[in-house]
Image (cartoon, helix red, strand yellow):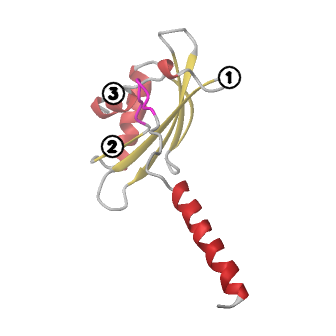
């Protein structure tokens, strides 16, 4: 046995033992929020139908339309919160599904000054969008 082997093997074994201990199965779980909010939903309806539904929802609910660009699928809307009277901003991105016919809708909600507290999120926006009749 060479001197290098005598030094290398114990160091290798010790390193392996230390690394194995670092990858333990005792990883703490991340707690889930009580009021989870969907930020993405896939719809079977074509892009044009979903875009028309978004415009109808904004009109029917008296939302302020800040910007819309159908060619990019981007819209920004604002609605006064019933809970505290502050505006809640909806940034919406729509795009056609690649794998199957339909549309993917992403919604990101914010207040004017920073992120809202979790309880002020509108958890029913995507459901209302799905039920809106655009005619």
- Specify start and end residues of the magenta stretch as a single range: 31-38
The answer to if 35 sits in the magenta stretch is yes
In front: mark 2 or mark 1?
1
Q: Residue at x 71, y 85 (%)?
A: 4
- x then y, percent, for residue 9: 62, 78
- x then y, percent, for residue 118: 51, 22
Q: Earlier in the sequence, mark 2 or mark 1?
A: 2
Side (left or right) of 106 relative to 66? left
Q: How far separated are the C-alphas under marks 2 and 1?
A: 33 Å
Q: How far separated are the C-alphas under marks 2 and 3?
A: 14 Å
In front: mark 2 or mark 3?
3
Mark 1, residue position = 113
Side (left or right) of 55 relative to 102? right
Q: Using the image as rendered, state which of residue 14 and residue 128 is in the foreground.
A: 14
Mark 3 Cα shell of 10 Å, populated few (<14), some (14-19), many (≥20): few
Q: Earlier in the sequence, mark 3 or mark 1?
A: 1
- x then y, percent, for residue 95: 43, 51
Helix or strand or loop: what does disc 3 sit on?
A: helix
Dominant SS type (magenta): loop
The answer to if 27 sits in the magenta stretch is no
Q: Quadrant of residue 40?
A: top left
Q: Using the image as rendered, state which of residue 34 and residue 22 is in the foreground.
A: 22
Mark 3, residue position = 128
């Amino acid at each position: 046995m060479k001197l290098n082997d005598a030094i290398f093997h114990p160091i290798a074994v010790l390193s392996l033992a230390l690394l194995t201990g670092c990858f333990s199965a005792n990883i703490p779980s991340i707690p889930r929020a009580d009021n989870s909010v969907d930020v993405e939903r896939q719809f079977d309806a074509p892009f044009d139908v979903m875009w028309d539904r978004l415009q109808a929802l904004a009109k029917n609910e008296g939302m302020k339309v800040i910007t819309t660009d159908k060619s990019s699928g981007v819209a920004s809307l604002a609605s006064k919160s019933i809970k505290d009277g502050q505006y809640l901003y909806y940034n919406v991105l729509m795009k056609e599904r690649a794998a199957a016919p339909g549309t993917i809708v992403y919604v990101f909600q914010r207040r004017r000054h920073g992120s809202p507290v979790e309880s002020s999120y509108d958890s029913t926006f995507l459901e209302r969008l799905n039920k809106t009749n655009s005619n």
